[in-house]
Image (cartoon, grey):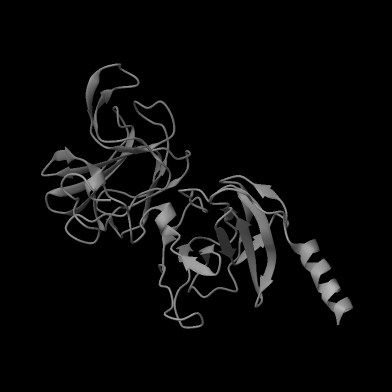
Amino acid sequence: MLRRTAVVALLLLATTSPPVHGASPDSWTWPLDDHTIGERFDPPATDYGPGHRGVDLAATAGDAVRAVAAGRISFAGRVAGVPVVTVDHGDERSTYQPVQARVKVGDAVRAGQVIGTLLGSPSHCPAACLHLGRVAGDDYLDPLELLGGGRFRLISPHGKPPEPPGGAGGLLRPVGGPITSPYGMRIHPVTGQRKLHDGTDFGVPCGTPVHAAAAGTVTARSSGGPYGKRIEVRPRPGFETSYSHLRAQSVSVGDRVSSGQVVGHVGSTGLSTGCHLHFMVLKDGKAVDPQGYL
């Protein structure tokens, strides 16, 4: 019995990757270059009950799958016949399936690094999709909280609270990543003039998919001027969302888009100093602070 226990212990040591130290990142990058959000996180009431323990991202079989954050590969194999890759980020882990691994256990990976290829089957989706999971210990968490579009957010205890998500004007975050320049007065980094920064800038890599913050109709698609390549979506009369400095635009004027649908990809077109998304919210044609709606 002791000998058998020793053999099991040796096997565990041989197949377990070195630990990742430090806290998990506050935000994730999208694992696919182009996708739409399918079934969302719906945790089960009990450990073995029905539910959806991650988020589905509809894509194309053969697409490259990227690590959502820096970490170390802790698993690359099959679970119940489904190819799975797991990345340990410290306090949390990200899981990807069905994915044919291009990495091996123990490999260190950076955010955005290709870790595998999306497979068309086996899949619980009608068509190819990536099932992305987020796990802390034995608990499943909502990946969209770190990608943008989660159920919960923190607000300042001071001043008037913003309108709640899901209420009038409630929007999904169009990309993950940090806010690099909020709405408000600032010195323009290109012109040097002090003026209103009429949106919120998210610092994410060029090529990152940009998601519609709400369902609506595409009212404008432009390519010139200080905003560069830009898409505008009107969720309802008198209320519009705008996505600027895009590298590529994925929708056309008149298209009806769903919440979370990819409308373009992050770039640095127009009056821009680097890759980022300039996100605007307009009420009755006037720019307002997007953070009150995200």
- Left or right, 41 with reference to 199: right
- Left or right, 136 with reference to 162: right
What percent of the width, then of the height, locates residue 206? 47, 38
List the single residue furthest toward the top.
192
List the single residue furthest toward the front.
2
Q: Nearer the viewer, residue 152 or 21?
A: 21
Q: Residue at x 55, y 69 (%)?
A: 138
- Which of the 4 quarters of the picture holds residue 273? top left
Q: Is residue 275 above or below residue 104?
A: above
- Left or right, 43 with reference to 233: right
Q: Is residue 226 above or below residue 127?
A: above
Which quadrant of the figure contains the N terminus? bottom right
What percent of the width, then of the height, locates residue 230? 31, 39
What percent of the width, then of the height, locates residue 73? 67, 55
Residue 219, can we see it? no
Q: Residue at x 48, y 51 (%)?
A: 30
- Which of the 4 quarters of the picture holds residue 270? top left
The tally of labels here is: 0
Q: Is residue 262 above or below residue 199?
A: below
- Which of the 4 quarters of the picture holds residue 37? bottom left
Q: Residue at x 45, y 40 (%)?
A: 204
What percent of the width, then of the height, locates residue 75? 68, 62
Residue 59, can we see it? yes
Q: Residue at x 46, y 48 (%)?
A: 26
Q: Nearer the viewer, residue 7 or 121?
A: 7
